[in-house]
């Protein structure tokens, strides 16, 4: 067999292994005094409609802080690293709110992977320059320069095996990442 076939096979194997990870998270409600000051300052400037609930989160990626609140009828989760630097903003949406073309590609991908699945939660995920994100939160059109993705948590069945999964898709509905959730999403604190 040609060398290119071997290299291609190894590349595909590595990409499959890297894309199929396990995910675990543990959230604990905390007082705002335990939150790094850059995160507090960022959230104060966002002017959320309701009280801010703060959480400390441990995951396979390390320690982070999360602020959860509402603005303009959306539930937001704003995540910061251990020093209070912005990681991303997630906004809960309905699956049907995803643009039809992207939603169709997402459904095709999920149907190819599972015998049966049920979507538990869908969030738009935004990341980019802190000032741009902060100025946009709750402000209508997503400005150019923000990266927008879809995070989908679902319960899926493959054969007899049922598990919870988290998928990350780009704005066009192309699969970016898959992770098996070690603890059920219900084990985490939802707002």
Image (cartoon, rainbow, N blue to C red):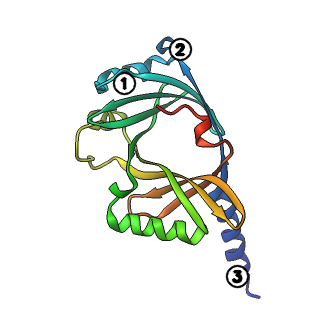
- Answer left or right for 25 relative to 122: right
Q: CA distance from mark 1 to mark 2?
A: 14 Å
Q: Foreground mark, 3 or 2?
A: 2
- Answer left or right for 190 relative to 184: left
Which comes before the other along the chain, label 3 or label 2?
A: 3
Single out the residue that lies furthest toward the top.
33
Let me know if residue 83 appears in the view: no
- Residue 107: image x %, image y %? 46, 67
Residue 53, by quadrant, is top left
The numbered dot on residue 43 is 1
Label 3 environment density (alpha carbons within 10 Å; few <14, some 14–19, many ≥20): few
Determine contact: label 1, label 2, CB under 8 Å. Answer: no
Q: Is residue 131 above or below residue 108?
A: above
The residue at 41%/19% (across/down) is: 40
Q: SS class of the residue under badge 1? A: helix
- Residue 31: image x %, image y %? 50, 14
The residue at 66%/57% (across/down) is: 18
Q: CA distance from mark 3 to mark 2?
A: 53 Å
Single out the residue that lies furthest toward the right.
1
């Amino acid at each position: 067999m040609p060398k290119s076939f071997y290299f291609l096979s190894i590349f595909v194997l590595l990409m499959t292994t890297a894309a199929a990870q396990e995910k675990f998270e543990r959230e604990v409600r905390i007082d705002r005094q335990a939150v790094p000051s850059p995160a507090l300052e960022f959230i104060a400037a966002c002017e959320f409609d309701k009280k801010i609930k703060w959480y400390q989160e441990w995951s396979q990626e390390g320690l982070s802080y999360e602020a959860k609140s509402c603005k303009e009828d959306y539930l937001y989760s704003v995540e910061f690293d251990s020093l209070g630097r912005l990681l991303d903003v997630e906004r809960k949406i309905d699956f049907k709110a995803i643009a039809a073309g992207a939603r169709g590609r997402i459904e095709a991908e999920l149907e190819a992977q599972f015998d049966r699945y049920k979507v538990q939660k869908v969030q738009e995920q935004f990341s980019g320059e802190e000032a741009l994100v902060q100025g946009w939160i709750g402000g209508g059109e997503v400005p150019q320069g923000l990266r927008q993705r879809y995070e989908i948590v679902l319960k899926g069945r493959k054969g007899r095996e049922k598990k919870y999964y988290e998928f990350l898709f780009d704005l066009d509905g192309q699969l970016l990442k898959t992770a098996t959730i070690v603890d059920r999403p219900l084990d985490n604190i939802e707002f």
